[in-house]
Amino acid sequence: MGNKVLVVDDEKLIVKGLKFSLEQDEMKVDCAYDGGEAVKLARENQYDIILLDVMLPVFDGFEVLKQIREFSNVPIIMLTAKGDDMDKILGLEYGADDYMTKPFNILEVKARIKAIIRRSGKHVKDTDEGKVIRKGELVMDIDARRVVIEGKEINLTAKEFDVLELLLNNPNKVYSREKLLNTVWGSEYPGDVRTVDVHIRRLREKIEKTPSEPNYVYTKWGVGYYFKE
């Protein structure tokens, strides 16, 4: 079997349709119909990605997301029926990697899943020298997708890692919010630049001693973000 996916939704027809379609692409699919069951399965299994509905019994999707982020950085796509910008922003704030609004096209769902899994997988460099980046007290292991600062491992989501990797690999180069969005999320990503701002803020909260006075990820006002060497 291929990648392992957890689908979380209380609408059983949606779950059945997603499960059938994903299994056609040789993915292994587990299903949960409420937030409690979702957290339990996420703790007990190693998933490549989770599709997580916002409106759920027991715990809503945001609470599930927060709980999962306490022990796992598995990529998570939020599913929302509302099309509400606030739902999308809250999902990103809590550590979601992407979001989709119902009703969605199953082909688009599969394309998003494959893109996120591809980007969150291990990156193999041509030379050993490129696999570990060291910047002061910060150490990034590209293959293991781990970040350690002052000997302590920092838990980053897939997108937070991708943003930091891009900036670290290109020190002092200023990336506009639009450029970061296109490079990390892809040119066809339907979100806007607020996605970038949310991830930069969350990233700073994790890697900076004082997020308002960063030592790693700087802002070039009116232009974008960069890693200062």
Image (tube, rainbow, N blue to C red):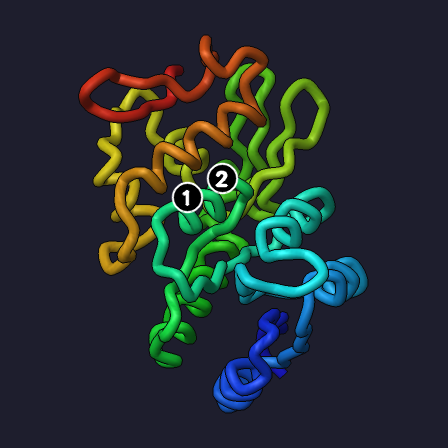
Residue type at tag 2: Glu
| Horizontal side of residue 220 vs 60, given as left or right | left
Q: Position of residue 25 (x, y in %)?
A: 49, 85
Could you classify mark 1 by the number of other residues whose Cα lies within 10 Å: few (under 14), some (14-19), or many (20 or more)?
Answer: some
Q: Are marks 1 and 2 in contact (CB under 8 Å)?
A: yes
Relative to the observer, which residue lies in front, 37 or 28?
37
Q: Position of residue 78 (x, y in %)?
A: 49, 59
* SS category of the residue bearing label 1: helix
| Horizontal side of residue 27 vs 59, given as left or right | left
Q: Position of residue 103 (x, y in %)?
A: 36, 75
Relative to the observer, which residue lies in front, 120 or 47?
47
Could you classify mark 2 by the number of other residues whose Cα lies within 10 Å: few (under 14), some (14-19), or many (20 or more)?
Answer: some
Residue 109 quadrant? bottom left
Residue at 26% across / 17% down in the picture?
220
| Horizontal side of residue 39 vs 1, given as left or right | right
Relative to the observer, which residue lies in front, 199 or 126?
199
Q: Is residue 122 above or below residue 33?
A: above
Residue 143 in view (yes/no): yes
Q: Is residue 133 above or below residue 68?
A: above
Residue at 70% across / 64% down in the picture?
38
Quadrant for the C terminus, please: top left
Residue at 63% across / 73% down in the picture?
4
Quadrant for the N terminus, please: bottom right
Residue 207 quadrant? top right
Q: CA distance from mark 1 to mark 2?
A: 6 Å
Instruction: Residue at the far top: name it.
Output: 213
| Residue highlighted by disc 1 | 89
| Residue highlighted by disc 2 | 93
